[in-house]
Amino acid sequence: MPDKKPITNKSSERKISIIENTPAVFEISDDLNVVDTAPIYEIDSKSEVVRWCGLIIHVSERHNVDPRLAMAIMYMETTHGWYEKLYPNMLEKIYSIRKSVLPMNIHYHYWRKMGVTKENLNCPYYNIEFGVILLERIQNRIESPTIKKIASIYNFLGAEKITNYGARVAKLYLSQPWVKKGCA
């Protein structure tokens, strides 16, 4: 009989499983109360998906991740996190030191045990590849993974129910707003 994978629902346990790449099951259930509509601060023109389209496809295929999922995550992060580039000095004063880097919005201190640094995340190739690696490891730990479930855990490692973030990413995955701008 094959070994049963441990169920890990705490953020800290999930983080260890991802870092050490050990078998685990991340449980996450549906939530019928989630909202998938765009918030007022989502600015389509700030999306970086078209800029990095080819790289997303290349890296995603290499890691067995649906490129549209990676594109939807990047769209979400760059259209919601645009203010960081507009007011970087103000944010550093408010938050001390910014600890995540776009376009995949990777928190370098949180993932430092995987070799992630602020410097290497400033390279778009590494930033996108690490984001895709996280997506791969999350999807491999969810039984019957869906876009909503993967995205919810990508946004909050301890998510046990689908979140508004996950629902919005799933809607973007289907609508593909980047296609009309030249990325298919």
Image: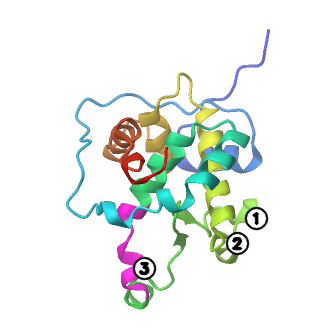
Residue nearer the viewer, 7 or 151: 151
**Residue type indicated by callout 2:** Asn
Three-letter amino acid code at the position of disc 1: Gly
For the point 68% across and 47% down, which residue is it?
Answer: 58
Secondary structure under tag 2 reads helix
The residue that appears at 31% across and 44% down in the rendered structure is 164
What residue did someone put label 1 on?
Answer: 115
Q: How many marks?
A: 3
The Cα–Cα distance between marks 1 and 3, rounded to whole angstroms, is 24 Å
Q: Which of marks 3 and 2 is nearer the N terminus?
A: 3
Magenta span of residues: 78-88
Apparent side of residue 25 relative to residue 178 in the rendered image (left or right): right
Q: Name the residue under label 2.
A: 120
State if disc 2 and disc 3 touch (CB < 8 Å). Answer: no
Q: Residue 101 at x, y = what percent?
A: 54, 70
10 Å crowding of disc 1: few (<14), some (14-19), many (20+)? few
The quadrant the N terminus occupies is top right
Q: Does the magenta-highlighted stretch encompass residue 94?
A: no
Vertical relation: 47 (above or below) 24? below
Residue at far top of view: 1
Q: Which residue is drawn at 67% across and 55% down?
A: 129
Say whether residue 81 is magenta.
yes
* Residue 157 in view: no
The CA distance from mark 2 to mark 1 is 9 Å
Rendering coords of residue 12 (x, y %) = 59, 50
Please say if the residues under marks 2 and 1 sit with CB atoms less than 8 Å apart: yes
Q: Nearer the viewer, mark 1 or mark 3?
A: 3
Residue type pointed to by label 3: Lys
Residue designated by label 3: 85
Neighbourhood count class around disc 2 (C-alpha, 10 Å): few under 14, some 14–19, many 20 upward: some
Q: Residue furthest left?
A: 40
Residue 181 in view (yes/no)? yes
